[in-house]
Image (cartoon, rainbow, N blue to C red):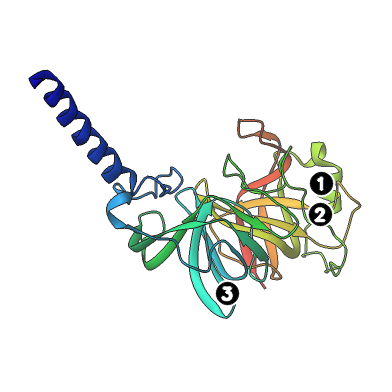
Amino acid sequence: MRTLHVVHHVAVIGLTIALTTGCGSSRKAPPASSDAPADAATTAASAGALLPGTGTVLETMDGGGYTYVNVEIDGSKLWVAGPQVAVQVGDTVSLSAGMEMREFHSKALERTFSVVQFVSEITPAGGRQANAAAMPPGHSGGTPTPASAGVTAVERVEGGQTVAEVVGDAAAWSGKEIAVRGHVVKYMSAIMGKNWLHVQDGTGADGSNDLTVTTDATVAVGDIVVVRGVLATDRDFGSGYSYAVIVEDAAVTKE
């Protein structure tokens, strides 16, 4: 009889522990990243009522493997962070269910968010998905570079080249200094320690109308800039991400 009593007592304790610990098991930890808090469970609260949902991007930045977006949903604004993905101000994005973090400090951005929702997915309209390798669009196997439709032709910079000349005859320009004036049609910040942009000047057909650039300069989509730097060809960043033509560490001047 004593043996049965002990077994029953242990079983009750085990059931109590299981029920107690199971109460918080439905919470999802934020995606793994250098920006993730060391102990998410101690600062996590229930997901906000606005998520999942669809909203408009008011502000965006990348850091620590995350894309941070300030979105407006049903008239309310909130910060959301998820796996890195290419988004722009004005984009409509769909957001998965989130986990709320209060007073979260991003080491990569050197910024503290009073409230931020960590989600597993940020999906811009059109279905672009998060880029697992945290690389900007335009590489092989990634999101296509922006179309040139609607890009107004700009006058070439004095002594410089057009995008079509550089990209269309990349072998001849490889390893040489080039100077190109054009519109910024795509911009992503803080990727592999650099800002990435796509520049078009209205010249060239598909495949020769877009120049990829990395720089320390900060610009915005729609800016007209002059890019100066050495053209590189067949640049491979590993993991299947490569560029046929790119200007790295360029000097970029906004006009």
- Residue type at tag 3: Glu
Say whether marks 2 and 3 touch (CB < 8 Å): no
Residue at left offset 90%, top offset 54%: 204
Helix, strand or loop under label 2:
helix
- Residue type at tag 2: Val
Q: Is residue 191 above or below residue 75?
A: above
Distance (Cα) linking label 1 and label 3: 39 Å
Helix, strand or loop under label 3:
strand
Horizontal side, residue 191 vs residue 255: left or right:
left
Helix, strand or loop under label 1:
helix
Horizontal side, residue 246 vs residue 210: left or right:
left
| Residue 99 location (% of width, % of height) | 43, 57
- Residue type at tag 1: Val
Pointer 1 local density, CA inside 10 Å: few below 14, some 14–19, many at least 20: many
- Number of the label disc, if any, that sits on residue 79: none
Given residues 50 and 125, the one toward you in this image is 50
Residue lying furthest right = 205
Q: How many marks?
A: 3
- Residue linked to disc 1: 167
Nearest to viewer (mark 1 / mark 3): 3
- Residue linked to disc 3: 72
**Quadrant of the drawing holding the C terminus:** bottom right
Say whether marks 2 and 1 touch (CB < 8 Å): yes
Residue lying furthest bottom = 75
- Residue linked to disc 2: 163
Pointer 3 local density, CA inside 10 Å: few below 14, some 14–19, many at least 20: some
